[in-house]
Image (cartoon, helix red, strand yellow):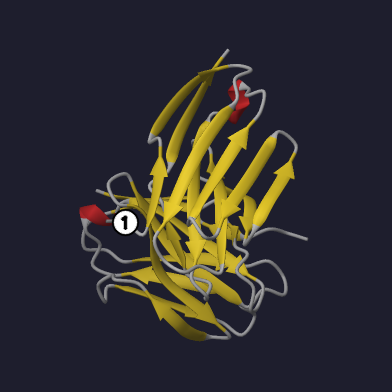
Amino acid sequence: KAGVTQTPRYLIKTRGQQVTLSCSPISGHRSVSWYQQTPGQGLQFLFEYFSETQRNKGNFPGRFSGRQFSNSRSEMNVSTLELGDSALYLCASSPNGRPEAFFGQGTRLTVV
Amino acid sequence: KNEVEQSPQNLTAQEGEFITINCSYSVGISALHWLQQHPGGGIVSLFMLSSGKKKHGRLIATINIQEKHSSLHITASHPRDSAVYICAVSKGSEKLVFGKGTKLTVNP
């Protein structure tokens, strides 16, 4: 079974631009969660999608958004990028109703 | 106060030593996770516990629900165990709350 796949692995963007990150969960998993990791704040929850619906949302500004498609693949979008958005963005997929989490390799975003 | 506290923050050991990393949490949980992160970013789930003890190779994880405490032990540590170990808890949904991590360095 393929693991959680995140693309791209690395990304460099300029302040003010927008970016879209992609996450393909493990086959059969319908829950996808997104996390931001920075040296100062550690790992923080962004949002969780289940069956194309946002089920939970963390404490991030509206510039951070996401969606999930019918095949459970998820995208997150950050608009009007700021230097502080530079981080490792991780997604995790979970089997329905179970607290297990399987992480992708992450996308490292650098905003210059 | 963070909901999940880990100690120590940094740990340096010699190859072969027995290592313990501790995690305390202050909320009701459905499960506790131990995660490993190597330089480069990818996170690997080592254990998910809701009670008792689990063992996988040289790694042992224990949890005491009454005391809201978990430990991760590494026996016969090896330089390849050098990584950041992160404790995280699930609170009834798929959202995880993370500790700050313990950076382990094992010297040959």
Location of residue B26 in the rendering, given as x and y in whole percent from the top left corner: 39, 61
Location of residue A18 in the rendering, given as x and y in whole percent from the top left corner: 31, 66
Location of residue A61 in the rendering, given as x and y in whole percent from the top left corner: 25, 72
Q: Is residue B56 above or below residue B96?
A: above
- Read off the chain for label 1: B
Circle 1 sits on which residue? B2
Task: Check disc 1 and give the amino acid type.
Answer: Asn
Q: Quadrant of the C terminus of chain B?
A: top right
Residue at 47% in and 79% down: A67
Q: Is residue A93 above or below residue A56?
A: above
Say which of A6 and B21 sits in front. Answer: B21
Say which of A9 and B28 sits in front. Answer: B28
Q: Is residue B78 left or right of residue A56?
A: right
Say which of B2 and A9 sits in front. Answer: B2
Can residue B52 be seen by looking at this rendering?
yes
Name which quarter of the figure residue B7 lies in: top left
Q: Is residue B60 left or right of residue B22?
A: right
Residue at 56% in and 49% down: B34
